[in-house]
Image (spheres, rainbow, N blue to C red):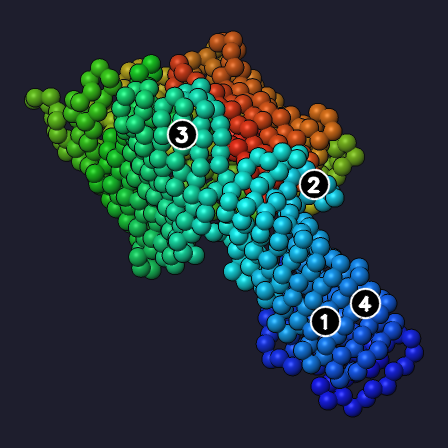
């Protein structure tokens, strides 16, 4: 090995193999971070690093110019150049190579016929190159690449693709590609995207980011079809205003309705985050202007003090069902307008809120608009282990108003007014190994001041109600073996007694109360109503037992639960002053079993059985089988006699059907109606560097109407997506769905 500097002190040549190390003359250093297999590892493109030269033959002057031949290799920092022949000009720190040229700069690889490169500035070129960008997986070929600097390269008459094949299925072809890694920006002039040899779109000029970083510009168009609007085309434009602010314009052409204009703005700061959206259209089908507005914001004003709002408005009742392509949005009937100010400390918190609602009424299935809360002030506090006692208190003032009723009485002001309550609680938890006992006492004191009452009606009411409860449970464990597997089984019996005396509440308004759903969570609540306008009388005992099965590593394989409530007196308080729906001395029986019984199978079941009616009131049976990634099959049966005798079978799946093809689908079948209530059916094709998706989805928009949407998408891996995106529909419809790429 021979070491040379700018003033060499040794020119000794030894053997056939020669190595030369030359100190660089510049003091510039550039550092970049690149992703490697083992993680994010920084590599340094250090121009101060020495240049190591290897060859089997060398001639020339070692302090000026060296000619290298046969198996030439030159290394400086993170750059390596190999060729058949090279001329290394030491003073200029420049190398010219030819014949089987191979070059690596950081994670990027190049090959070519001839190349010139300055080791100091990074300037140079490669003739007839092929290239592979390590950070993105992109590759291509060109007539020439000119390196303007270590950060910038210009590709002349080149191609780009993430396909690994020599003849890629898709590629970008451009007259000029300017790739600026320093600014993370690429620009294309005279470019087309080819798929299977056919140009699918192009542009005379286009700029794009070289990584996942945001950049202003036109986003990929989306194309779709719905039965509500027909053909749809959206061409979004993205503005990267600042690192913490952006804005997207999305004009959408809807064939049957016209041009819809939309905008979405996002912002983020050290103490706040928010999003604003708006869209509007002059609808040709209805002949009216229609719009949607939304604004969400969260902000920390001071330590423990925060501000938030969620404001939404649409022009009419049918806006969500006519323009939404999401089952969640299309079935939404209440839009909230909420502003809140919250203060929280270690032991207490306070919330001031104003909440109003817009009801998107379904004329075939009308519902009552909730009461507005203008305002609502809540203060609550708690302290634990004060001499063994846990103390808590909740206090609230709310003014209720409602100027909207069912369709038959729209516009008529309903009974409103002020409600104030305070509820202190005291409990004494006794927790020991293997068991717990928690007695608890609470007192509710509520007062009403009403307005808009009928003439002569009472306007002031007071209610004071104590509640006593005691919660007790035990915990047992045992080791067992099942199907050759060692398991730990628990047995956890629990008793929950509640005593609340009866108070006549028929004269009180109902601003926010309703009957809770009867399930395992509710049977351990003291009040069988939600809201605060009704407090149910109770003299009852809930008995339940839970058994769980654990693997040796602690994973829960199965959970089985059984519970029932026993009444020592028939409850009398109701919501609408009708007769109580609770009959007999005991409630329906509840049973559930769920868990991943194996690494591939998950089970769920929930039963509510009425002994008085000798029939199942509610039941859910479900099984999910996922033998390997991208293979899942879900089957569920639901029965609910309390909800219009609902009976449904829900089947969903993602499954490979033959080489590279995957079928996706979901059918929610209503047995009484003998029809598919919700459905999804599609195909996905996974190639090496692209994915094609064809999906159709049917979703109910009102009680009597449904909409069908069609999604067609071509995803070019690492570059762009063409068409409409069905991913939200697939993930929400098929539990366990996984992207195939």
Count neighbours of disc 1 (C-alpha within 10 A) and say few if under 14, some if 14 to 19, many if 20 or more.
many
CA–CA distance between discs 1 and 2?
33 Å
**N-terminal label among 3 and 2:** 2
Element under disc 1: strand
Q: Reply above or below: 615 against 254.
A: above
| Disc number for residue 85 | 4
Residue tagged 1:
95
Asked if the residue under mark 3 is in contact with the one under mark 1, i.e. CB atoms within 8 Å, the reply is no
Quick one: label 1 or label 2, which is nearer the N terminus?
A: 1
In the rendered image, which quarter is residue 72 located in?
Answer: bottom right
Q: Is residue 626 left or right of residue 319?
A: right
Q: Quadrant of the N terminus?
A: bottom right
Proximity of marks 3 and 4: CB atoms separated by less than 8 Å? no
Q: Earlier in the sequence, mark 3 or mark 4?
A: 4
- Identify the image quadrant of the C terminus: top right
Tell us which disc is closer to us: 1 or 2.
1
Q: Which residue is label 3 attached to? A: 253
């Amino acid at each position: 090995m021979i070491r040379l500097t700018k003033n060499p002190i040794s020119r000794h040549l030894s053997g056939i193999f020669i190595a030369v190390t030359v100190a660089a003359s510049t003091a510039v250093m550039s550092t970049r971070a690149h992703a490697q297999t083992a993680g994010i590892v920084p590599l340094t493109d250090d121009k101060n690093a020495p240049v190591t030269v290897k060859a089997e033959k060398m001639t020339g002057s070692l302090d000026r110019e060296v000619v290298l031949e046969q198996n030439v290799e030159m290394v400086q920092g993170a750059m390596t150049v190999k060729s058949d022949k090279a001329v290394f000009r030491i003073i200029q720190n420049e190398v010219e190579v030819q014949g089987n040229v191979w070059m690596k700069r950081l994670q990027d690889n190049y090959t070519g016929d001839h190349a010139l490169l300055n080791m100091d500035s990074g300037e140079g070129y490669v003739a007839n190159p092929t290239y592979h960008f390590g950070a993105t997986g992109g590759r291509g070929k060109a007539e020439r690449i000119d390196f303007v600097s270590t950060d910038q390269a210009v590709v002349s008459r080149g191609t780009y693709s993430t396909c690994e094949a020599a003849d890629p299925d898709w590629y970008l072809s451009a007259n000029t590609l300017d790739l600026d890694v320093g600014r993370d920006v690429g620009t294309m002039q005279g470019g087309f995207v080819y798929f299977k040899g056919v140009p699918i779109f192009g542009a005379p000029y286009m700029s794009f980011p070289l990584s996942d970083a945001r950049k202003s510009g036109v986003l990929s168009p989306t194309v779709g079809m719905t039965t509500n609007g027909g053909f749809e085309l959206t061409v979004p434009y993205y503005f990267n205003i600042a690192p913490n602010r952006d804005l997207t314009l999305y004009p959408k052409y809807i064939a049957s309705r016209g041009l819809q204009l939309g905008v979405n703005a996002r912002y983020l700061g050290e103490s706040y985050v928010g999003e604003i959206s708006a869209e509007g259209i002059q609808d040709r089908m209805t002949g009216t202007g229609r719009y949607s507005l939304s604004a969400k914001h969260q902000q920390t004003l001071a330590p423990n003090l925060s501000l938030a709002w969620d404001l939404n408005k649409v022009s009419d009742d049918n806006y969500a069902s006519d323009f939404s392509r999401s089952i969640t949005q299309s079935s939404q009937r209440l839009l909230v307008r909420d502003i809140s100010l919250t203060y929280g400390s270690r032991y207490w918190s306070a919330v001031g809120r104003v909440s109003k609602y817009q009801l998107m009424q379904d004329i075939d299935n009308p519902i009552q608009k909730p009461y507005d809360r203008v305002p609502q002030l809540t203060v609550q506090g708690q302290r634990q282990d004060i001499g063994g006692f846990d103390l808590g208190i909740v206090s609230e003032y709310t003014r209720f108003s409602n100027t909207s009723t069912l369709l038959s009485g729209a516009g008529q002001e309903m009974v409103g007014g002020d409600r104030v309550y305070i509820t202190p609680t005291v409990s004494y938890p006794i927790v020991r190994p293997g068991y717990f006992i928690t007695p608890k006492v609470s007192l509710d004191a509520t007062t009403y001041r009403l307005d808009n009452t009928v003439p002569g009606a009472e306007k002031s009411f007071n209610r004071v109600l104590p509640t006593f409860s005691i919660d007790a449970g035990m915990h047992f464990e045992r080791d067992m073996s099942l199907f050759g597997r060692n398991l730990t089984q628990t047995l956890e019996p629990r008793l929950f007694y509640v005593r609340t005396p009866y108070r006549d509440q028929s004269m009180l308004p109902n601003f926010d109360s309703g009957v809770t759903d009867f399930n395992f969570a509710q049977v351990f609540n003291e009040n069988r109503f939600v809201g605060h306008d009704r407090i149910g009388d109770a003299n009852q005992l809930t008995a339940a037992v839970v058994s769980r099965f654990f693997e040796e590593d602690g994973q829960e394989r199965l959970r089985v639960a059984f519970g029932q409530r026993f009444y020592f007196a028939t409850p009398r308080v109701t919501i609408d002053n009708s007769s109580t729906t609770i009959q007999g001395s005991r409630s329906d029986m509840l049973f559930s079993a769920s868990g991943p019984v194996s690494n591939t199978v998950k089970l769920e079941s929930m039963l509510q059985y009425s002994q008085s009616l000798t029939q199942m009131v509610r039941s859910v049976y479900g099984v999910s089988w996922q033998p390997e990634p991208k293979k899942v099959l879900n089957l569920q049966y639901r029965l609910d006699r309390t909800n219009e005798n609902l009976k449904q079978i829900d089947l969903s799946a993602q499954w490979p059907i033959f080489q590279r093809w995957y079928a996706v689908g979901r059918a929610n079948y209503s047995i009484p109606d003998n029809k598919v209530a919700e459905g999804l059916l599609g195909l996905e094709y996974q190639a090496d560097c692209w994915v094609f998706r064809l999906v159709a989805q049917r979703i109910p928009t009102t009680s009597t109407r449904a909409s069908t949407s069609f999604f067609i998408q071509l995803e070019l891996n690492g570059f762009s997506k063409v068409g409409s995106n069905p991913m939200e529909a697939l993930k929400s419809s098929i539990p366990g769905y996984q992207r195939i790429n």
